[in-house]
Amino acid sequence: MHNYFPKFVLLIPVSIALVLPAPSAAQSADDLAKQTQNPIASLISVPFQGNWDFGLGTRDATATTLNFQPVIPFAITPSTNIVLRVIMPLTSQPSPDGTTRYSGLGDVLTTAFFSPSHAGKLIWGVGPALLLPTATNNRLGSEKFAIGPSVVLLTQPGKWTLGALGNQLWSTSGANDRPSVNQIYLQPFANYNLGKGLAMGVSMEASGAWHAQDMWTAPLLFSVSKVTMLGKQPVNLAVAAGPMVASPTGGPSWRFRLNATFLFPR
């Protein structure tokens, strides 16, 4: 039976960089808003990302995914950081005929980016990505262990953040009655900071299974985000929505997203 979703889920970059003292709260919010758009910066962040995919199957059903996505940076040498990004999806997905729902934990994706601690105009990171077969229902995961390279490149001129993130995964072991994993993920993104912690952005999150007849699932998401304080806790709140520019037969037609990223300066 066809599974509408790729075996892994990625997200809009949500980590932030080291925060320097600022002369005003507005300036601090502006710094944070821009730095939350850097996926390999040096601040611990804990995002909770809710996704709703609409228009599935003959019943136009809805699938939901809550991604818990901690980002933890480490300094391994004076000149090199390693940034661990973990994505743990909790999914509720309808069957193709819409008569049954499958809910539970999906496969966990872990990425380790190695990047310079003092980046220039071009910020970059490379490292391995690991797909772990943790799904509690075999329809929510691949039942395969997979590994491959991951890379992120971005630049932040003026009020802009422009970049792209991607990975490629190949399965190395797992259930022999399940298809092998040979998947690519590409995410170009652009953000413009309006001031006072407010930003607008657009990104495409294209997941492709090379062996599939309908290869791509690719939502084009337009977002608005705001850095604010919940008591003494800095948090980045975001809302995004957009159409599927590519989708398998019976797949979703558009996606809606809510995101809350809790920020922990070190």
Image (cartoon, rainbow, N blue to C red):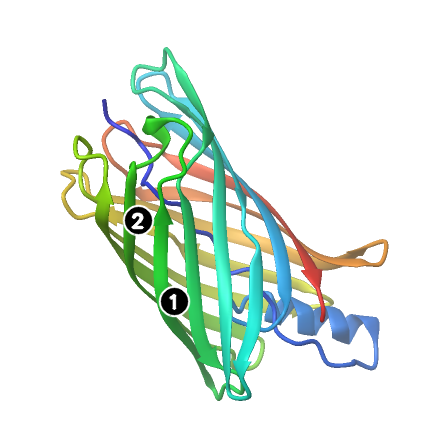
Label 1 and label 2: CA atoms lie apart by: 14 Å
Residue 188 in the image: above or below residue 52: below
Circle 1 residue: 164
Amino acid under disc 2: Ser
Query: Regarding mark 2 in the picture, which secondary structure is present there?
Result: strand
Residue placed at 65% from the left, 67% from the top? Answer: 33
- Number of marks in picture: 2
Amino acid under disc 1: Ala
Q: Check the picture and name the quadrant holding the N terminus.
A: top left
In this rendering, would 71 be left or right of 236? Answer: left
Q: Check the picture and name the quadrant holding the C terminus.
A: bottom right
| Mark 2 residue crowding within 10 angstroms, few (<14) / some (14–19) / many (20+) | many
| Mark 1 residue crowding within 10 angstroms, few (<14) / some (14–19) / many (20+) | many
In this rendering, would 102 be left or right of 119? Answer: left
- Residue 207's disc number: 2
Residue placed at 62% from the left, 54% from the top? Answer: 46
Q: Are marks 1 and 2 in contact (CB under 8 Å)?
A: no
Residue closest to the eye, 65 or 158: 65
Q: Position of residue 16 (x, y in %)?
A: 61, 68
Residue placed at 31% from the left, 17% from the top? Answer: 58
Residue closest to the eye, 184 or 170: 170
- Residue 52 visible to the viewer: yes
Residue closest to the eye, 200 or 141: 141
Residue 212 in the image: above or below residue 28: above
Q: Position of residue 85 (x, y in %)?
A: 49, 59
Query: Regarding mark 1 in the picture, which secondary structure is present there?
Result: strand
- Quarter residue 251 falls in: top left
- Quarter residue 26 falls in: bottom right
